[in-house]
Image: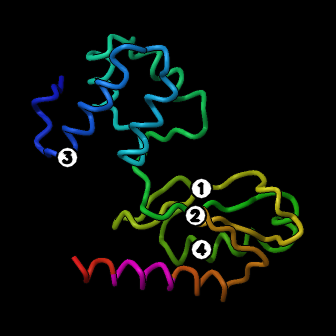
Amino acid sequence: MIKIADITNIEERKAIENIIRNYREDSGTVISLLQDIQGHYNYLPAYILQLLSRELKIPLSKIYSVATFYAQFSFNEKGKHIITVCDGTACHVKGGPLLYDYLINQLGIHGGETTPDKIFSIEIVRCLGCCAISPVMIVDDELYGNLNMQKISKILSKIRKEEMIQEGSK
């Protein structure tokens, strides 16, 4: 079993210690606890959930029952940029499946997966409620509508270029 002292990354250790401190008094806020963990890691690592269960005296079964009930939580590491693809009726009728196939071929991953470089993740949802501008997808918090292969290619190229610039500035 992992202990706080086993976490060698100082920033990670401080983040976990802060989360424990924030929830030590109120263990009834499991949703908020999970949101903070996912906010820090971009997913829910099993070893951190076990650590928090022990430290906060919350049954691990309770943590997992909440985490599996709400779709917002993920047990798989997500990429820096999350692409949410609509598979609603309007998007489907207007070529969404072909665009999804193009997207997965460009990234080499399917829905629920993350690229090996941890840059992109793809999620599929039933409807984004933007039928008038279908087919649509959301990248991070930005909505893109009236999509075609050229638009998707430009979106991915722009993100990759920004990532290269950020990587080069480090």
Q: Earlier in the sequence, mark 1 or mark 3?
A: 3
Q: Nearer the viewer, mark 2 or mark 4?
A: 2
The image quadrant where one finds the N terminus is: top left
- The residue at the point 34 percent across, 82 percent down is 164
- The Cα atoms of the two marked residues, 1 and 2, are separated by 6 Å
- At numbered mark 1, what does the secondary structure look like: helix, strand or loop? strand
- The residue at the point 33 percent across, 17 percent down is 24
Q: Tell me the amino acid under the disc marked 4.
A: Leu
Residue 40 falls left or right of residue 136 = left
Residue receiving disc 1? 123
Determine the image quadrant of residue 124. bottom right
The residue segment tinted magenta is: 157-165
Residue receiving disc 3? 11
Q: Tell me the amino acid under the disc marked 2.
A: Ile
Can you say whether 10 is above or below 33 in the image? below
Q: Earlier in the sequence, mark 1 or mark 2?
A: 2
Image coords of residue 68 (percent x, y):
54, 29
- Check residue 102 for magenta coloring: no
Verify CB contact (< 8 Å) between mark 1 and mark 2.
yes
Image coords of residue 55 (percent x, y):
26, 17
Label 3 neighbourhood size at 10 Å, few (<14), some (14-19), many (20+)? few
Q: Earlier in the sequence, mark 1 or mark 4?
A: 4
